């Protein structure tokens, strides 16, 4: 009974989503699928799961639309990620589960509110993207402290590096005109994986007889996250490189401009005062 009380917030969230999913599947089976507009999906979960999440968040969207700024939702999501990292660092895995999973739900909600309210701005997109990266870093920092006495620490470092490179590779590729939205371990998958693994670890950690399983479960979860995130980042890198390699090289053309001068206005070339300076620019 103590185990259920300790995990009550996380279990309530899990059971609520599970019950809603059963209802959603039942409506489709009965031939009355809910009307869902603007649902996004990724490679792993697919359109059906994307429509389910949008359908679940629908009542909350209607409640908050026009009353709460999307940036406020983004800031709250970042705060929950920071608190999840603190909970993980202190060994309070049940708190880390529902805090991190709630932050992931808010991360979906802020973009939905921005689109529905017509307040999509470049500044808001920047705030959202950067907040997501800081949020993940804060969460992974907490798990790193939790595992700092074990070799599983390297799993956290790999997961953190892989998640950052997934995002950076996409941003760099899109800056060069290549769409890199695919991959098996994007942010939504990472939130689900880490939350699920932490929930299992917290379940075993609530029993003194199985307490020794907590660190290996968290370590294996983050190892899977590290491997899958790295594979996603490398896949995006290779795809972008192949696409860019097939493009015609860009040739810079310098046009010469003839300037008509009169003898009175002609200016003699200046004598160099010293050796020429070589300036090298960083493409990044």
Image: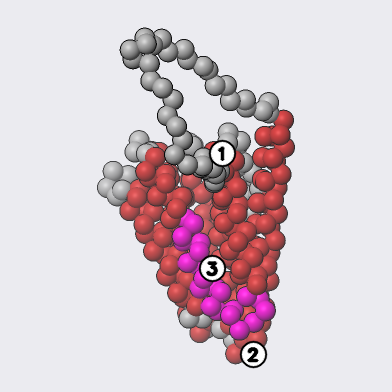
Classify 10 Å Cα crowding around label 3: few (below 14), some (14-19), many (20 and above): many
Residue drawn where x is 49% and y is 57% of the image:
133
Q: Which residue is mark 3?
A: 140
Left or right of residue 256, residue 204 in this image = right
Q: CA distance from mark 3 to mark 1?
A: 26 Å
List the single residue furthest toward the left. 67
Our reading of the magenta stretch's main secondary structure is helix
**Where residue 109 sits: x, y (%)?**
42, 49
Left or right of residue 256, residue 71 in this image = left
Q: Is residue 31 above or below residue 105?
A: above
Residue 22 seen by the camera = no
Q: Which residue is mark 1?
A: 174
Residue 148 magenta-drawn? yes
The residue nearer to you, when weighing 218 against 261, is: 261
Residue drawn where x is 67% and y is 57% of the image:
230
Region in magenta:
132-153
């Amino acid at each position: 009974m103590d185990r259920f009380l300790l995990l009550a917030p996380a279990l309530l969230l899990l059971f609520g989503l599970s019950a809603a999913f059963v209802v959603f599947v039942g409506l489709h089976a009965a031939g009355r699928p809910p009307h869902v507009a603007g649902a996004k999906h990724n490679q792993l979960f697919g359109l059906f799961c994307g429509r389910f999440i949008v359908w679940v968040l629908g009542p909350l969207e209607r409640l908050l639309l026009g009353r709460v700024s999307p940036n406020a939702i983004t800031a709250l999501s970042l705060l929950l990620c920071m608190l999840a990292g603190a909970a993980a660092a202190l060994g309070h895995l049940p708190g880390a589960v529902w805090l991190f999973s709630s932050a992931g739900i808010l991360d979906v909600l802020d973009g939905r509110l921005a689109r529905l309210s017509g307040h999509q701005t470049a500044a808001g997109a920047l705030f959202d993207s950067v907040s997501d990266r800081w949020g993940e870093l804060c969460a992974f920092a907490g798990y790193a402290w939790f595992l700092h006495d074990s070799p599983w620490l390297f799993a956290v470092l790999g997961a953190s590096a892989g998640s950052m490179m997934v995002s950076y590779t996409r941003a760099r590729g899109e800056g060069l005109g290549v769409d890199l939205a695919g991959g098996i371990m994007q942010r939504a998958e990472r939130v689900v994986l880490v939350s699920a693994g932490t929930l299992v670890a917290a379940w075993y950690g609530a029993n003194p007889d199985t307490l020794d399983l907590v660190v290996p479960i968290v370590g294996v979860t983050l190892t899977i996250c590290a491997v899958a995130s790295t594979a996603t980042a490398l896949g995006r890198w290779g795809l972008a490189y192949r696409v860019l390699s097939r493009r015609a090289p860009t040739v810079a053309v310098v046009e010469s401009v003839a300037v008509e001068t009169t003898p009175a206005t002609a200016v003699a070339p200046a004598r160099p005062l010293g050796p020429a300076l070589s300036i090298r620019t960083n493409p990044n």
